[in-house]
Image (tube, rainbow, N blue to C red):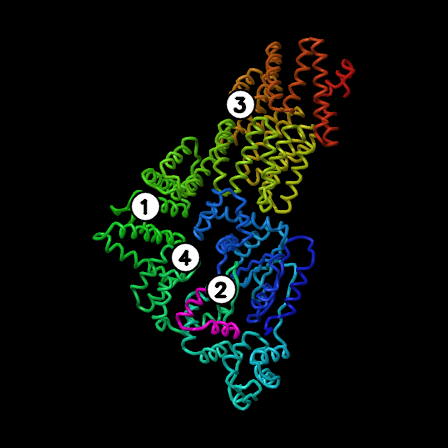
Amino acid sequence: MTWNQTSAIRQLEQLLKKKPAEFPVRISVQSEYGSGTAEMLDTFVSRRNSDSFFINRFDFRNEQHRPAHWQLQTVWELFRNGDPLFLSFLNGFTKPQQRYIEEILNSLPEISPERKAALQNLFFHFFHSLGQTRKFIFIFENTQEIDRLQAEVLRRELDRLSVLPLFIIYSGENIANHQLSIAVDHRVVLPRLSVREVAQNIRDYFSTSAINARIITNNCYFKTSGDPLKTRLLLEGHYRRFLAEAPDGFINIKQMQCSRVSGDWHFVLEQLFNHIDEQTQITLSILAYLGGSAEINDFKNILRHFRFSDFSMTHWVRTGLLRQFTMRNSSYIGFSEHILQDWFYQFVPAQRLKKHLQIIYDLHVKNKLSEVYKISHLFYEVGETEFSLKSARRESAYLEVYLKLGVNENAFEILRRLRDEKIQSAGKTSDSDRDAWVDISLKIARALIKMDAFQEAKYILRDVRSKKFCLPRCKGNCYQLLGDIELNFNRKNVARKNYLEALKYYREKAAPSDLLLLYKKLKGLIELDESGYQAFLSILQKMPVNGSEAQELYCYLLRDRVKYRVKNGLPDAALHTADTLSRELRNVYHPQLVFQISLLLAEIYSLRGKWKLAVSHLDSVITHPVIAFYPALSVQVYIQSALVYKEQAIYGEAERLFKKAMEICRRKGYSLQQNEIKLHLGHIYLLVHSLPRAREFLKQVHDSAEKFQQTELLTLAKLYLSYYEMKHKKWESARGLLREANTLIKSGGNKTDRMNYLYYIGLWLLETGSHGKAAPVIRLFTTLAADNPRYLAAAGYLEVKLLSAQKAFTAAERRLRDILKITQEQSLPQVRYLLLCEAVWLLQKIGKKRKLKAQLKETCTFIRQMAQAIGDTIFTTQFIESRYHEDILQLCKKQVKEVDV
């Protein structure tokens, strides 16, 4: 039969053949309720060649949408079903990484946000590997079931996949006027069936004559208005009895005309319900009570125990009552529309299902069912308390999952009853009963917190904590959950107190998962220092490291320790920790951690002047397959790459990379990153002496950062603007900006911010002749920069200027040569340029003409080389024509004719 619409399928197929201007291509299938959209999509999917297309379907009627849920389920189904392409893809990882991936897949659905991110990256990684040979079709059905916020989350998730050759198909009721306003590029309309189509389908359905089909069509068409589902259900529930047994027999017109027929859903379903036998009613009611759908092999098991043949299921599918469908490579059977599920749920009381529930329970116990189906609340409804508790014990591990899915109150009540049962026996029976009571109590408390029932959760946690048999780890769990409650009320100090109390108990006994969760929460409330990281590491070292959670926590601690050390200007210590982390990351699959450590290593090597190593780490990130799905991270990599070129004075390449990052920012609306890029561009324009353009960019950043309280950007903008003001000899304006920057740094700056400030205030003091005040500033700067060659060279440059101003020429010359060695070793051309210019002016003061001539040659040659390396014609011209070294070039022309400038 062709109840589905061939014209709609043809339209979809034509859209797949077109070469779009860009991906993803968004298509909506517009239809009315009962128009057979799902069946049409079933046929459409069945015709696609798996060698050319990868198809994924997600039905919002069967599963609620949570961030990344459909992506995680896709990966899980590929793994569970042993998809050859996916298994081949996994073989590309190290054995420890494969074991790690398998462990987190088996821990679904309750996983940490970090593990969720890892699996999401695995999803991106796998599909990127297929993108060269296949197109992708992602189908999202029943979009009317999601709200505006969920739709926005879905949109962002799909936008991230724009690097794939992706077609997205949305379907749902009245999608054209959908409140979510889902943006689509193409619309495919699924009209109701015509009279001729209905007649042809009736003839095929009953294998009857054209006359009989026409008579039934005339009787039902205007009642159903061509609704395919209503028509099919009426055929089975109402019209079948009027047909003779022989296919060519004539329909009983008189009997049919005397019977009432209506297109009202209540009439259609009542006729169908009364038509089917009691055993069928019970079986379908069981399916309704199980949630409206079941994995097909599970349902076949149930049918066999009810002594139904597979043919019966096929028949129900043919009538339109049920629908067989595929979700993420697994086959399911379910009601074709939720109104059918609701009918069988309401019109067959749970009391009639007692013995059948027992059969399903036995199948669960014998592991004959592949999925966990909630039946404890049904036992509770029919008065089977013992079985409700037994089922609840099996289901209790899934309580948090059920709550996320909207579990009903009865299931929650059963857990309460189970808890009460355990506490009654806790005083007189085994330790296992006490442990079970504590475990169930903590599950209930977590569930109550998620339901915002904070007071009740508090009561349970304090009750658990007060029990003598509550072990240290459980007490730690109690304090941690109490901290969560306080955090919900924004009582951060009280939350922190509870978390620190939890940490005390975890010192005695804890699982890596406990410590990992606590670490993430405390990190948001406390600025950890070296001792803080060491406290967590010492607890972790006492644990048996035999699971991936301990490895994860170790990696996070190392990453944050590297960040702390880089931020506080400790590159050598940071490098040692980063190397340790790089080795650990070979045992886990966490691309984002790999990206973060690569970026940190690039920063460390930049601080040490090892630019090639810095670039190699940045290139490893930008060429990783997963990076394509993270435009914000791509921006960050481009910015850091640009900064590496900026430090090498290759300003043209730096500007190109900054503009590439800016283009992504404008397209994606990343305002903060745009400000950061403008800040660095403004600084480049300062360095090539394009002062008006520098001020334009820096002023934009300054005003925006001030408005949106972006302290770090605002601090640097003030420092760079102070340099601009110094260039124009506006000393008071420069001093005001420096004073404001210092205030910001005192309220929350780090060591790097402090060193930047000391450089510019030192320069200001020297330029304004305050040599006495400049000396202690430069000494402090030199001390802070002791382990940072880049800043040490900058401090040395200020020291040379100070010694020259104090007429300590011999010391100045000696110090200048020492700092020039650092700039040579660390490849710091900008500071080297300043020092070489200073060397010329110093020798002019001393009056050493022979040395001056040699120095002029060296300085002018370097200026020429630096100008050529800039890599941009405009920048090169601006740099060469700068007033800063104008006198040096003129003197050079006079005294060193062989140097071509």
The amino acid type found where label 1 is placed reads Cys
Q: Main secondary structure of the magenta part?
A: helix
- Tell me if residue 304 is in the magenta stretch: yes
Q: Name which residue lies at 49% across and 69% down.
A: 335
Return the x and y of residue 92 as percentages of the image width and height.
54, 45
Badge nearest the viewer, 4 or 3: 4
Q: Alpha-carbon distance for marks 4 and 3?
A: 54 Å
Badge nearest the viewer, 4 or 2: 2
The amino acid type found where label 3 is placed reads Ala
Q: Earlier in the sequence, mark 1 or mark 4?
A: 4
At mark 2, the secondary structure is strand
Q: Earlier in the sequence, mark 2 or mark 3?
A: 2
Q: Which residue is mark 4?
A: 403
Q: Earlier in the sequence, mark 2 or mark 1?
A: 2
User: Which of the two residues, 429 or 358, is positioned nearer the viewer here?
Assistant: 358
Q: Earlier in the sequence, mark 1 or mark 3?
A: 1
Quadrant where the N terminus sits is: bottom right
Badge nearest the viewer, 1 or 3: 1
Task: Name the mark on residue 332.
Answer: 2
**Magenta segment range?**
296-320
Please say whether residue 748 is visible from this viewpoint: no
Q: Tell me if 752 is positioned left or right of 545 in this view.
A: right
Q: Earlier in the sequence, mark 4 or mark 2?
A: 2
Return the x and y of residue 43 as percentages of the image width and height.
59, 67
Task: Name the mark on residue 474.
Answer: 1
Please say whether residue 16 is visible from this viewpoint: yes
